Image: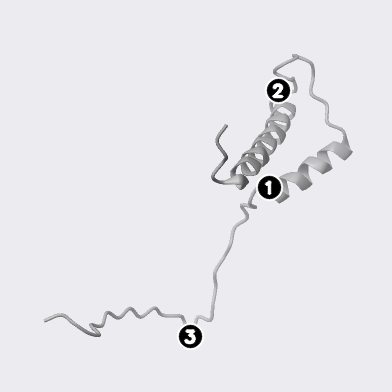
């Protein structure tokens, strides 16, 4: 078998799969309450829920809103300048 060019790729894929499994489990619990494979009700105790929360915080970006604000009396301005330094006729 040929060697992988990017060894980190496999670890990255495994991490994504675990994250998606956590999300799927939470969705099954919240939306319909049944495990799609067994048909039994999904139960998540407090300790497992906290563990899922911690793992998701580590693997998914937080989508909280970011507000940029500044001094209204001294606003920032952007100045773009194109200058020919050498060459060209």
Instruction: Please give the name of the residue rendered at 55% of the width and 73% of the height, measured from the top-left corner.
Output: 69
> Crowding at label 1, few (<14), some or many (≥20) Cα neighbours within 10 Å?
few
Q: Nearer the viewer, residue 71 or 20?
A: 20
Q: CA distance from mark 1 to mark 2?
A: 25 Å
What percent of the width, then of the height, locates residue 29? 75, 28
At x 63%, y 55%, the residue is 64
What label does residue 74 carry, if any? 3
Q: Secondary structure at mark 2?
A: helix
> In terms of depth relative to the viewer, which is nearer, 88 or 79?
88
Q: Residue furthest left?
A: 89
Which residue bears the numbered disc 2? 32
If the image is split into quadrants, where does the C terminus sit? Answer: bottom left
Label whose residue precedes the other's in the sequence (3 or 2): 2
Query: Image point 71% across, 16% down: which residue?
Result: 37
Q: Quadrant of residue 70?
A: bottom right
| View extreme (top): residue | 39
Which residue is denoted by mark 1 in the rendering? 59
Give the side of residue 70 with respect to residue 33, left or right: left
**What label does residue 70 carry, if any?**
none
């Amino acid at each position: 078998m040929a060697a992988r060019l990017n060894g980190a790729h496999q670890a990255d894929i495994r991490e994504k799969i675990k994250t998606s499994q956590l999300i799927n489990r939470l969705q099954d619990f919240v939306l319909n309450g049944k495990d799609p494979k067994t048909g039994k009700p999904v139960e998540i105790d407090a300790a497992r829920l906290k563990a899922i929360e911690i793992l998701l915080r580590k693997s998914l970006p937080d989508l909280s809103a970011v507000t940029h604000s500044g001094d209204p009396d001294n606003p920032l301005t952007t100045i773009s300048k194109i200058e020919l330094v050498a060459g060209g006729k």
